[in-house]
Amino acid sequence: MKLLSILFFILLAGTCLAFAQKQTFTAAKIEFDHLGPYSRVQLEAVAGMHAGTEFTAEDLDAAAQRLADTGFLGVVGATTAPGRIDAITVLFDINPLDRSQMLHLTFENFVWLTPDEIQAALQTKAPLFLGYAPQNTQLLDEFNDALTDALAKKGIQAKVMHDAFEPSLRRPEIDVDYWIAKPALRVADVKLTGVSTNLVPLIQKSVNSVAGKAYSDGLPGGRTSEQILLPLLDAGYIDAALSDISVTPSVSGDSTAVVVAATLHSGEVYHVSGIVFAGCPLLSADAFAASAKLHAGDVANRAQLLETLEPLDTAYRREGYADVIVRAKPKEDSATHQVAYTVTVTPGEQYHIKTVVPNGLAADDQGAFDSAFAMKVGGIYNPEYLAGFLKGSGAWQGLAGYSLAYKAYADPDTHTVDLVLNFAPGGVQQNVTVFGGP
């Protein structure tokens, strides 16, 4: 992060004098011009300066550098307000990063740690951590160690891993998901209270669907609690929620069985009163309406709402807008149990291809790849093209004997993508986009 040149001035006997480097002063007050999401206590702790701290010009320089080194603040500067040598007000000019410039962290299966314990563990590495981390930071790897240590203190010897995931309809942010790879956690049972008789068939279906599956409280859209609610959300219970969730683990060898207990609040069934979309350069309002799966008068089915938004999301992603956010903002009428959706698009920036590295091809097949692969350096990043590359015909029939597992390393700062394409004979195609660089 950038550190501004620091000016030190005090008013003494009516004259503005520059600090001598070894002159000692006493801070009467520490002020920050932009707190952002942080408290004064947090920022003072990082700076290492509080009311009553004695300091020199070098000390103030070092305090500002400590703030800059966190990576959570864009630009840091420090000045002093006019005053007595023994009662100086220190002013830190900071610019906290906007959350749109940061990575949202999720924690998939840390059932032995509370959210507060997770935050405390990560703040040992990053005192300003509040659920988000700067892009392109080494902290992401250090957090693996912090979480491993926190689990060890609970008597759990675990292997912690993480990966980053691009935004989607279900997740409007770049998410970095942390999970315990060992021991593996699976759902043994689900115990719900508050389930009315008419909802038993719906809930029984979802409970059966998560039993025996991996437990998750990480990436939005894939959480166990969300899977339990899916049949209700698809049946129009748009306010359905679980409260008082508890997860009880039981370790056996390299695996852990968890029992999930919660109270269900179903709410009422809602119908759609309308879906408003003004149109955009990549998809007109008429085209959007023509492909819509959800219409006025229908039950407010979550799955059909996502299917309705999918063509809009796809239209932007195929043009390189990997950060696009498509939202359907609901406006509920609790008296009539109707909901109106207003659809908006936040495109973000276009991503272009920086490098393409194919691995695993026989020498005779390299030419076929060079001829067939249309996503060249400098071109638009299109995940739809990548996903279907080996399913085509014609020019790439010479690659028909291969499967493709690729990673697209996206850099949110430069809006470029490094493609690593790993070919192998036979097998299944796998596709991953990773934010933050290889």
Image (cartoon, helix red, strand yellow):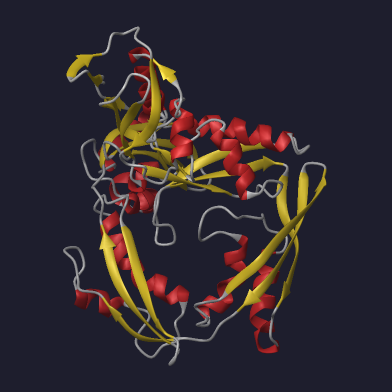
Res. 422 visible in picture: yes
Q: Quadrant of residue 78?
A: top left
Q: Quadrant of the N terminus?
A: top left
Q: Is residue 97 left or right of residue 348?
A: right
* Above or below for 264 versus 249: below
Query: 27 or 241: nearer the eye?
Result: 27
In x, y percent, where is residue 215? 66, 55
Query: 205 or 399: nearer the eye?
Result: 205
In x, y percent, where is residue 135? 38, 37
Res. 7 visible in picture: no
* Above or below for 73 versus 19: below
Q: Is residue 114 left or right of residue 49?
A: right
* Above or below for 210 versus 401: below
In x, y percent, where is residue 8? 26, 19
Q: Is residue 118 left or right of residue 360?
A: right
What residue appears at the point 56 percent right and 72 percent down from the top-left corner?
230
What residue appears at the point 65 percent right and 75 percent down from the top-left corner?
264
Q: Quadrant of the C terminus?
A: top left
Query: 204 or 405: nearer the eye?
Result: 204
In x, y percent, where is residue 334? 45, 87
